[in-house]
Amino acid sequence: MKLYGYLLKQEIYQIIYVQDVFSQYEDFLAAVTKAFDPKVLFLTVIPIVAGLSTTLYSKLLLSVLLTEYANTLVKWILAEDRPFWWLNETKEFSSLNRPKIYQNELTCEPSPGNPSGHLMTSTTYLFVIFSVLEEYVGKYGRFPRISLRIAYYSTLFFISISRMYFGCHFLHQCIFGIILGIVMSKVCLSHRLEKYIAKQSGKRRIAFVGFICLIALGLYWTQKLLGIDPQWAVKMAFKWCEDPFYLKPTTTLVFSAIRLTGSLFALAVVGPILKAKPLNMKLSIPMVLAMMAFEWIALDYTPRNYGVVVYFSSSFLLYFLFTYAYLRWVPALAGQEIRVSRSDRNKSKSN
């Protein structure tokens, strides 16, 4: 434990160094950390993909949901501090030499710190997108592929810097998030996994999601039985955040589990889509944008004054309905029939 405390102490100095060096780029780093927030990705960037390609959206959705769920479970298991409260709780510093790190509204996240959700989710999301782009530009030679990989790792670097700059994560939490994100990307992009899930019946897929939920509930109640408060991170964030109004319930692990479970159930009902009609983007893009706007409004007006059960149930239902709509309604209403030419028909008849 002494070695662990010593390492975290050195990482605090790394955060202070990052805050000093990158202070003039704070607006840029704030934009980066906001843009790659898992919730923002899930409610903006990923739905736009649903307006471009149903199969790509299905692949991306499967990868991101499983990755985010894995992140939630690992966070609960490791139960590791975030820098902005560890610094104030640790005995590695005395009252005389305890440094102070900069924090603002982006700092105060009420969930455990390891692994970084921003980096784990972004690694998977970008891996899927860049894999598709790399396959497309591969015919133009090595330079475009190398450029894409440089862009990929550069983006992960700036996300890491932004998370350290705002005191959200230690360096090792960022690195661990990237490693787990790459592992989950490899697993989720496996065609065998996607085909295997697609072949299962709807009941089996729903049962699988139910099993994942039982694991999360098991972790929650196991901590309770061991005398550990599963919401300890929320209390630590309230204790050491400079302004309690910075804290948002949507960044807690419980809400993340509710959000992910609703979308996972929708994916289980529809199933991974391996083949789909090409979309009429003049119709699909406006449709998706309108649905995104309506989803943001619906989530913003989710009832919060009628207890936790009503709030979580409403959130679960909204995430289920909109994920289902992106998977089912968009291709149903904006899918294009594939026209076959006469020559192709004659060839098929002759064969």
Image (cartoon, grey):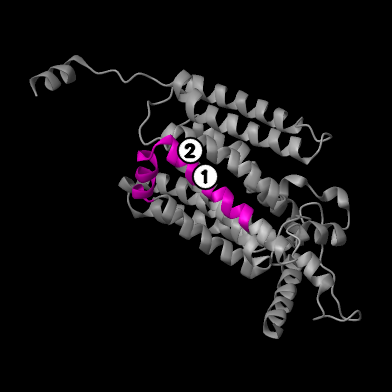
* Residue found at the very far front of the displayed protein: 225
At label 2, counting other C-alpha atoms closer than 10 Å, the crowd grade (few under 14, some 14-19, many 20 or more) is: many
Residue 29 pos. (x, y %): 70, 54
- Amino acid bearing label 2: Ala
Quadrant in the picture for residue 85: bottom right
Which SS class for mark 2? helix
Is label 1 in a helix, a strand or a loop?
helix
Q: Residue at x 91, y 79 (%)?
A: 95
Q: How many marks?
A: 2
Q: CA distance from mark 1 to mark 2?
A: 7 Å
| Residue under pointer 1 | 209
Give the magenta range. 190-218
Labels 1 and 2 touching (C-beta < 8 A): yes
- Residue 165 painted magenta: no
**Please, which residue is most extreme toward the right here?**
96
Residue found farthest to the bottom: 2
Residue 121 seen by the camera: no
Q: Is residue 199 magenta?
A: yes
Q: Position of residue 58 (x, y in %)?
A: 46, 38
Name the residue: 14% across, 22% down: 348
Q: Amino acid at mark 1?
A: Val
Q: Nearer the viewer, residue 249 or 338?
A: 249
Percent from the top left, x then y, of residue 332?
A: 45, 21
Q: Residue 351 lies in what quarter of the image?
A: top left
Prevailing secondary structure class for the magenta stretch in the rendered image: helix
**Label 1 CA crowd tier, 10 Å (few <14, some 14–19, many 20+):** some
Determine which residue is flagged by label 2.
268
Side of 161 where 53 appears, left or right:
left
The reply to whether residue 8 is in sight is: yes
The residue that appears at 86% across and 48% down in the rendered structure is 245
Residue 268 lies, in percent from the top left, at: 48, 38
